[in-house]
Amino acid sequence: MAYGGSSSGDPNRFGTEAFYASLGRAFVAMCAVIPVLFLIEALDGWLGNPFDTAAGIVPHQIDGLDGVFFAPFLHHGFEHLYSNSVPLILLGTFVLAAGGKRFLYSTLFIIFASGLGVWFTGSPNTIVVGASGVIFGYLGLLLMRGLVERSWWNVGVVFLVGLLYGWQLVVGILPSDPQVSWQGHLFGFLGGLVAAILFRRRLDSGAARLGS
């Protein structure tokens, strides 16, 4: 049900033509990101894997601080990248569908929240790379966006991902596997929650919608 005019052109309203068109464009864009990540990983392997050391996050060390920005574009081999590709496309598509500017601002905020969290709290003498902090950030963003913008389909996406990955999501933000940077996952998720509030869509009280 809607008040205050037609919503057929609203890309944020589930079920409209504009929504599906925006979702399709976002999916194509996210699919285009993955080959770039594979190209970076292939180049890294061809050169003898210098990128992780040079541009990964090294907790508590000033010369490892630049990895806060670069680490999400790097991975510990193709298996690591494969495991991140599908959830990155899936979640990134729904985040991007809500608008390119919001996607950019939210992604940057999540990258820095996750990266700085790792840098301040990560284990010394480790190198942290990977896009999983961003993935968990997108989870937090969609969950909080569904609440603050009353877009329940966003919450539905989070539950769908929960059904697909289940226990991995819970374990991901807990200090379980020493080879996994749970700090990046946790601070990415928290960054996503905050980003959803900072970069939320302003609801027009004169055109309030139900079920969007």
Image (spheres, rainbow, N blue to C red):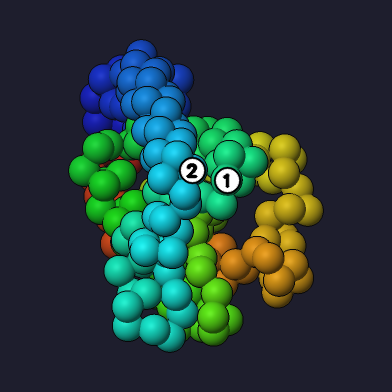
Residue 11, x across and y down, in percent: 31, 27
> Is the residue under label 1 in contact with that under label 2 (CB below 8 Å)?
yes
Tag of residue 77? 1
Q: Nearer the viewer, mark 2 or mark 1?
A: 2
Q: Give amino acid for label 2.
A: Gly
Position of residue 212 relative to residue 71, above or below, is: above
Q: Give amino acid for label 1.
A: Gly
35 lies left or right of 161: left
- Tell me the quarter of the image containing the N terminus: top left
Q: Quadrant of residue 67?
A: bottom left
**Spatial distance from mark 2 to mark 1, Cα to Cα?**
8 Å
Q: Secondary structure at mark 2?
A: helix
Q: What residue is pinned by disc 2?
A: 45
Q: Quadrant of residue 159?
A: top right
Badge 1 crowding class, 10 Å Cα cut-off, few under 14, some 14 to 19, many 20 or more, is some
Is there any visible trace of residue 170 in the rendered image? yes
Q: Residue at point 74% right, 62% down?
A: 171
**Viewer-proximal residue, 84 or 25?**
84
Q: Residue at point 68% right, 55% down?
A: 169
Position of residue 30 relative to residue 48, above or below, is: above
